[in-house]
Image: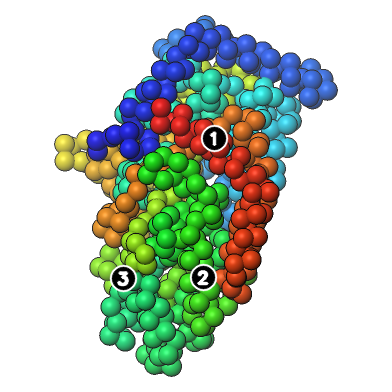
Amino acid sequence: MATTKEHVGSNTNTHKRRESKMSNNMNRRTFLSVSAAAAAAALAGCSGGDGGGGVGNEVSIDEVTPEDVALPLAETATLAGLTNYPAGSEAEPNNRTIFKRLEEETNVHIEWKTIQGDQWGDKIALEMSNVSTLPDFVFNAGFGDTELLKYAKQGVIINVEELIDKFMPNLQAVFAQAPEYRTMCEDEEGHIWALPWIEQLGYEKTAIQTIGNMPFINKWWLDSLDLEIPKTIEDFEAVLVAFKDNADKLKKEFNIDGDIIPMSCIMNDGGQDPYILINGFGEGYGDPDRGKHICVTDDAKVVCVANSEGFRKGTEWLHGLYEKGLIDPEAFTQEWSTYVAKGKSGRYGVCFTWDVANIAQVSMDDLIAGEGWVPLPALKADVVNITPETGSFTSGFQRGRCVITAVAKNPALVASWLDKMYDPIQSPQNNWGTYGEDDDFDIFEMSANENGDPMLKHTWLGDASPVEVREAESVNGPLAILDSYYDVYVTCPDDAQYRLDWIKDVYTPDMNGKYCYPNVFMNTDDTTQVSNLMADLMKCINTFKSDSVMNGFDDAAWNQLQSDLDAYGLQEFIDIHQKYLDEYLG
């Protein structure tokens, strides 16, 4: 796909930004070894002793050639890693087929320490502060920007850009093909503090992440009542009313136990939030970033959607639906488990989520055929528009997925082993699962592409849950799957393909804006300030949303919202985001 300055994430803008950092390149070669030495002292100081002995690099990267750490090694080497695993799945990484094969292929043995995934957030900070147990690398870290910058400042982790350039050819190839990802990994001084996770499914306005809280409508009910898929807010409201008025008929026909719920959602809960419905009001911004409530106008200005006329009008309209009994009264309080349980009972006419198969009783065959449940198109109010979610043009990306710690004795070997994760055949397995397992299901079978080269082919899982199979087989961690890999190294997963088709066919044609806010790497001061400002701003906006949809609001309440946002520092919040957008666009 051609890239232009109008698309945030374009290669042209990436090169401009990288050129501005070239003056720092001469300092990088010495920075890694210096920072490691500083880290050793810092960590020793933090631990109140000598750091447990051997803290810091024993093998300088200047003393190592790529050939020295080329895989497989002539003799077995051992590294220490820390990772997490989903509750209910295999806790020992070396019992997973993926890591068994990697050890055979690389002659590198990993001594793992593991933490159950639902306990990771509580325990990882303690792990990172304990030098006596710190491993060579944290594989599935998932660190946010604040954590990365904190650990970098403390000297707990090392910058890895020189390691990438010298010992990681697979990741170099990814960055060469999609240089915007390297840009997104770099801080203001050009340093890279972590190895990324990249999952491209589509690109720019066809990317699978452009809409997270996708609205779905029950086509079985529509067909039963001889109704069409609504295209306007008036049509939509009429359909909800029809669902409510024909509740007894629907319950009998579809054998539903429980009350009919025309529309359910979870207010302010990411993918289950209903505010994608308000995109057509006013300016057409909608609320594409439910974490920050910002978007970018066509003249490249960052705005808060809670200031907009469309947000006000859309909220008033949603209150009207609630007042008429068309929205689930539990939408403001229900947990995910409750939301799913009611959906699996067949009680919903409209719901919101990433994949409706997680909520409703519907088969993949039905979804592929466009039966049962279908995505609800953009509704016309004042305009017809869909605003893509923040960061979605570059698809799935997390810059803090894996870090190399300051205690790594041979960071070059660590980098060489981690680079294996970026092999185009390896990355899909780490992300989704593998082939040749001893159990009943495999995500893949090893096949061949049209040129006869190895290609991972997704298998049909039948009634097995894709999530459960993936959790049993995958290892996650640092990886990269580019859109160009499909049908070359791996097939596209079926449950992603139908969602990609929905994005491309149903929503991309109505994505009329030029920009979406990019995934930027702010400095420590700005990251801290944004975090501080967000605490009050997001609470203020989200409280207004819930209260106003449930109870309505008047001019005084709207004006009070604007006054509160000003008092909580909204303009500074916008200005910081504008600074990074301007830098990104060049």
The crowd level at tag 2 (other Cα within 10 Å; few <14, some 14-19, many 20+) is many
Mark 1 crowdedness (10 Å alpha carbons): few <14, some 14-19, many ≥20: many
Mark 3 lies on residue: 231
Q: Earlier in the sequence, mark 3 or mark 1?
A: 3
Q: Which one is in front in this view, the residue at disc 3 or the one at disc 2?
A: 2
In the structure shown, which secondary structural element does the residue marked by tag 3 occupy?
Answer: loop
The x, y position of residue 464, in whole percent, is: 41, 63
**Residue for point 27% across, 55% down:** 509
The quadrant holding residue 254 is bottom left
- Residue 316: mark in rendering: 2
Instruction: Tell me which label, 3 or 2, sits earlier in the chain.
Output: 3
In terms of image quadrants, where is residue 111?
top right
Q: Are marks 2 and 1 in contact (CB under 8 Å)?
A: no
Q: Secondary structure at mark 2?
A: helix
Determine which residue is flagged by label 1.
Answer: 400
Q: Decide which of 319, 30 is in the foreground and name it.
A: 319
Res 567 label: none
Q: Is 79 rendered above or below residue 227? A: above
Q: Is residue 500 in view from this perspective?
A: no
Rendered-image quadrant of the C terminus: top left
Residue type, label 1:
Gly
Q: Amino acid at mark 3?
A: Lys
Q: Position of residue 542 (x, y in %)?
A: 60, 59
Dot 3, crowdedness within 10 Å: few (<14), some or many (≥20)?
A: some
Q: How is the image coloured?
A: rainbow
Q: Is residue 206 above or below residue 258?
A: above
Residue for point 62% across, 11% down: 34
Which residue lies at the image location 45% right of the left edge and 80% below the top edge?
262
The residue sitting at the right extreme is 48
